[in-house]
Image (tube, helix red, strand yellow):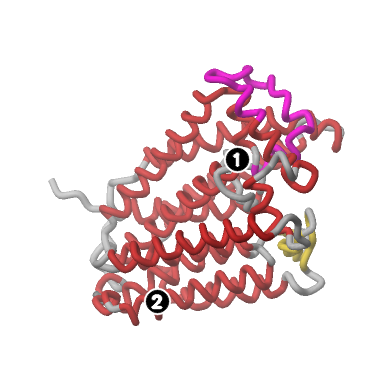
Amino acid sequence: MGKSLNSKKKYKKKSDYYDYSLVAVIVLLVCFGLVMLYSTSSYMAEVNYGSDMFYFKKQALISAACLIVALVVSKILDYHILVPFTTSLYVLSLILMGLVRTPLGHSSHGATRWLYIGPINFQPAEIAKIAVIIMMAYMICKMGRKVKTLKSCMILGLPGAGLAFAAYILTDNLSTALIILGITVGMVFVAHPDMRPFIIIGVIGLVLIVIGVLFLVATTKSSDSFRIMRVLVWLQPEKYSDEGGYQTLQALYAIGSGGFFGRGLGNSIQKLGSVPEAQNDMIFSIICEELGIFGGIFVLILFGYLLYRLFFIAQNAPDLFGSLLVTGIFIHIALQVILNIAVVLNLMPNTGVTLPFISYGGTSIVFLMSEMALALSVARQIKFQD
């Protein structure tokens, strides 16, 4: 099993393979996202900043730069170089999240999750997502066959659980903590040969969540905790329209008014201030309003194909470490897409998770492109037999 971390020499010979299909779907998602970002944000950008292209220009510049860097890095980087820096990256992510609690931390929309270091500002919790993927891949390779025992699975999950806890405590970011924990559980599940323990734990967890929600609804009418209020708003958005349900209701109105083919690109009504911060978490609702169910399905097809390419790379990776890296990236992207769309459709409480490559956010694009560079680096070393 140790060979999976030290197979650099074995695959040192340059491969002619490069996953241009993955590159194509990334470019499509980015371009589609920029079109929808401009359509969604132009009115409010003009009102607030005096330029209808305020959000578009920033996102387009960052996206183009990150895409070019990702392609160049994927061509020259051997992903095995990450192995010696696994622990360092993990510790760095903890330190950066800790700095959020210092004067370097910056508050936005009532939450202190940003870090300002000179002209650079970013959310350090995004680094933690990449750090946990690399750490889990490294540990699974080192543990080898020992992963099959329950004790080893618990030990394996500790770094991910610790990073998730740190993200929640240090940045007060429950959604990112849940994603980090989801990546951890997903990678342990993939490495473990028996799925029955996970099914049992999953069923027990689901039952406890249902009982908790029912108890909350029966005993709580209002709460000072915004997380409890999010659950109440999720269950009865009309009742709590003045306490957080407004955004959810307006998003649902946008989706419902779009019909099958939508109002037409640029013709959304809800983006004119009815859906707050529509260019961020709720951009999928504007997509459905302007392009209809057809547009929503098109977005899901693009993400589905992106995940298929990641699955293909993970399945054909030259070694276990590369396969696990791409598996972690697959889980991360899938989780964010599912959580974002579930929130927009009011299938779960609001979590503040963005839609990858489409929602506005420079930090998100930078680290998503970093993950794509890793996936393409793994794909570049795939060997096919004639």
Q: Where is residue 247 in the image (x, y as percent from the top left)?
A: 72, 40
| Image quadrant where one finds the C terminus | top left
| Image quadrant where one finds the N terminus | bottom left
- Residue holding disc 2: 156
- On screen, 107 above or below 234? below
Q: How crowded is mark 2: few (under 14 residues within 10 Å), some or many (20 or more)?
A: many
- Residue holding disc 1: 344
Q: Is residue 280 magenta?
A: yes
Front residue of 210/157: it is 210
Residue that sits furthest to the left in the current view: 386
Which numbered tag is attached to residue 304? none
User: Which residue is found at the position 69% from the left and 36% from the top?
Assistant: 249
Q: Which of marks 2 and 1 is in front?
A: 1
Front residue of 146/45: it is 146
User: Which residue is found at the position 41% from the left and 65% from the top?
Assistant: 204
49 to the left or right of 28: right
